[in-house]
Image (cartoon, helix red, strand yellow):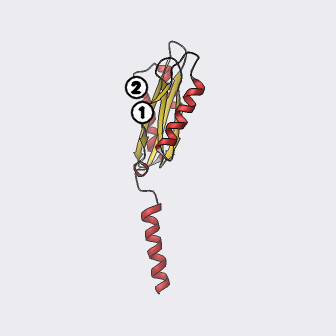
Amino acid sequence: MLRLVSFLSACVLFSLFYVTQPGAEGAIAWAYGSQAPDRGWICMKAVNRPTLQAAEEAAKNLCLNSKFSTALRDQCRKNVQSFHRQCVVCAVPRKGVGFGWGKAAQEPDAIKAALAECDKTKTRGSSECRVGKVSCDARDK
C-alpha cells in the first residue's frame, strides 16, 4: 500500500511540473518580399493558445488582417510554424532588405537564430539586423 501511495504521489508531482499547462501553444506566420511592389516583411505571432491548431489559425488571421499587400498576406498565411513552450522573434536590417526569424526554448537562443537568418538574407549595403519583440509561451518566459 505504501508503494502505491508513493507511486501516485510521484505521478501527481510529475504532472504538476512536467506536463504542459493549458495555453502553452504558439505559432509564427511570416512573409518576406524583396521586390517591389511586395517589398517588406510580416511577422505575426500567436502565443499561449489552448492548442497548436488554435495558435496557427490565430497567426494566419493576424496575417489576413494586416495592412500589407495581398501577395505578402497570402504568403504569410502559408508560412506558419507552430511551437510548444518556446520563444520566437523576427529580425530585419535597420536599412536595406533582409529578414529572419528564430525559435528556441530560451529567449537568447531565439534572438541569435533570428539574427543569423537575417544576416544570411540581407542584401549588400543593408545595415545590421535588429530584432523585434520576443514572444514566448507562458511557461518559458
User: Outermost residue, front direction?
Assistant: 128
- Type of the residue with mark 1: Asn
Nearest to the observer: residue 14 or residue 120: 120
Determine the residue positioned at 42% across, 47% down: 137
Percent position of residue 17, x then y: 44, 62
Q: Is residue 141 visible?
A: yes
Q: Is mark 1 on a helix, strand or loop?
A: helix
Sequence-wise, the earlier of marks 1 and 2 is 1
Percent position of residue 76, x then y: 50, 28
Determine the residue positioned at 44% across, 32% down: 44
Q: Is residue 80 visible?
A: no
Q: How crowded is mark 2: few (under 14 residues within 10 Å), some or many (20 or more)?
A: few
Q: Is mark 2 on a helix, strand or loop?
A: loop
Percent position of residue 102, x then y: 52, 37
- Using the image, determine if residue 131 lies above or below residue 95: below
* Front position among marks 1 and 2: 2
- Using the image, determine if residue 108 lies above or below residue 131: below
Total numbered labels placed on residues in the image: 2
Q: What distance separates the C-alpha of mark 1 from that of mark 2?
A: 9 Å
The answer to whether 121 appears left or right of 65 in the picture is: right
Nearest to the observer: residue 102 or residue 44: 102
Determine the residue positioned at 48% across, 82% down: 4
Q: Circle 1 sits on which residue?
A: 61
Q: Circle 2 sits on which residue?
A: 66
Determine the residue positioned at 51% across, 17% down: 96
Residue 34 is marked as none
Percent position of residue 90, x then y: 48, 32
- Type of the residue with mark 2: Ser
Q: Residues within 10 Å of mark 1 (few under 14, many from 20)?
A: some
